[in-house]
Image (cartoon, rainbow, N blue to C red):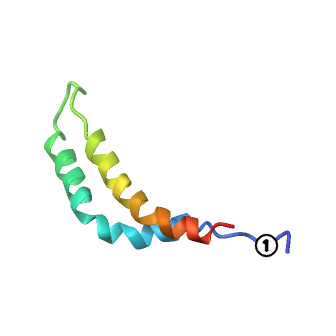
Amino acid sequence: MADEEVADQKKYLEEACKPKCVRPLLQYQACVKRIEGDETGNKHCTGQYFDYWQCVDKCVAPRLFAKLK
């Protein structure tokens, strides 16, 4: 039993929640496309990136904590 690999439930839950967060993902992808040619490095899509992962985390958290012992 000690040698048995434990599966990380968070990864599975994230994959299940990603379809629910399509809008923030599309906003992030649009931002990336918009700043593609920026040579200065001043433009970024950090806000949209975090918005997407906040949506995923908000979906995952209740399910994940229910499974933890």
In the rendered structure, the answer to whether residue 57 lies left or right of residue 8 reads left
Quadrant of the rendering where the C terminus is positioned? bottom right
In the rendered structure, the answer to whether residue 45 lies left or right of residue 53 reads left
Q: Residue 67 location, x and y as percent?
A: 60, 71
What residue is shown at x 21% (from left), y 32% (from top)? Answer: 43
Say what secondary structure mark 1 lies in. Answer: loop
- Depicted 15 relative to depicted 52: above or below: below
Q: Residue 39 location, x and y as percent?
A: 20, 28
- Depicted 50 relative to depicted 55: above or below: above
- Depicted 17 relative to depicted 45: above or below: below
Q: Quadrant of residue 25?
A: bottom left
In the rendered structure, the answer to whether residue 25 lies left or right of residue 8 reads left
What residue is shown at x 54% (from left), y 64% (from top)? Answer: 10
**As shown in the figure, which amino acid type bears the numbered disc 1?**
Glu
Front in this rendered view, residue 63 or 27: 63
What residue is shown at x 57% (from left), y 65% (from top)? Answer: 65
Q: Residue 47 location, x and y as percent?
A: 28, 41
Badge 1 local density, few (<14 within 10 Å), some, or many (20+)?
few
- Depicted 11 relative to depicted 36: above or below: below
In the rendered structure, the answer to whether residue 13 lies left or right of residue 3 reads left
Front in this rendered view, residue 62 or 8: 62
Quadrant of the rendering where the N terminus is positioned? bottom right
What residue is shown at x 46% (from left), y 65% (from top)? Answer: 60
Q: How many marks?
A: 1
Q: Residue 54 location, x and y as percent?
A: 37, 53
Q: Which residue is label 1 attached to? A: 4
Q: Quadrant of residue 38?
A: top left
